[in-house]
Image: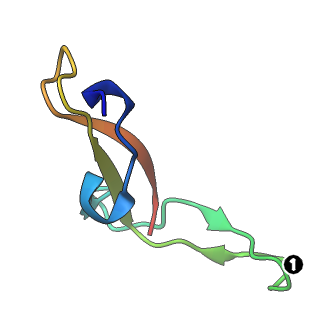
Amino acid sequence: MDEYLSVFDPRKDLLSVSMPGTRHGASLGTKWVKGGSSTGQAVGNTVVIQLKFVKNHMKPKTWVVYTACPE
């Protein structure tokens, strides 16, 4: 199989990194969940960044940001 056509497997090709989103500890915002409160809920102060492994990518060589969201 051609190395550029390899199948993406999130179990081995994603790396999750958690880090504080703000220095003063405040919530990053509000989230709404289907069937949840109409006023929403605070999401907290932590951001989860998912890095995707991309073999032979030009720059950076292997890991690129796949998605980032509040935890």
26 on left or right of 52: right
Q: Quadrant of residue 60?
A: top left
Instruction: Name the residue furthest front.
Output: 1
> Which is nearer the eye, 22 or 19?
19
Q: Residue at x 40, y 45 (%)?
A: 7
Q: Say which element carries label 1.
A: loop
**Mark 1 neighbour density, 10 Å: few (under 14) some (14–19) many (20 or more):** few
53 on left or right of 42: left
> Which is nearer the eye, 57 or 70?
57
Q: Quadrant of residue 32?
A: bottom right
Q: Mark 1 sits on what residue?
A: 38
Q: Residue at x 66, y 78 (%)?
A: 41
- In the image, residue 66 sits, relative to residue 5, either above or below, namely below
Give the percent coordinates (x, y) of residue 55.
20, 32
Instruction: Name the residue furthest left.
Output: 61
Instruction: Name the residue furthest bottom.
Output: 36
How many marks the image carries: the answer is 1
Give the percent coordinates (x, y) of residue 43.
53, 71
Amino acid type at image mark 1: Ser
What is the quadrant of the N terminus in the image?
Answer: top left
- In the image, residue 19 sits, relative to residue 67, either above or below, namely below
Q: Residue at x 30, y 27 (%)?
A: 2
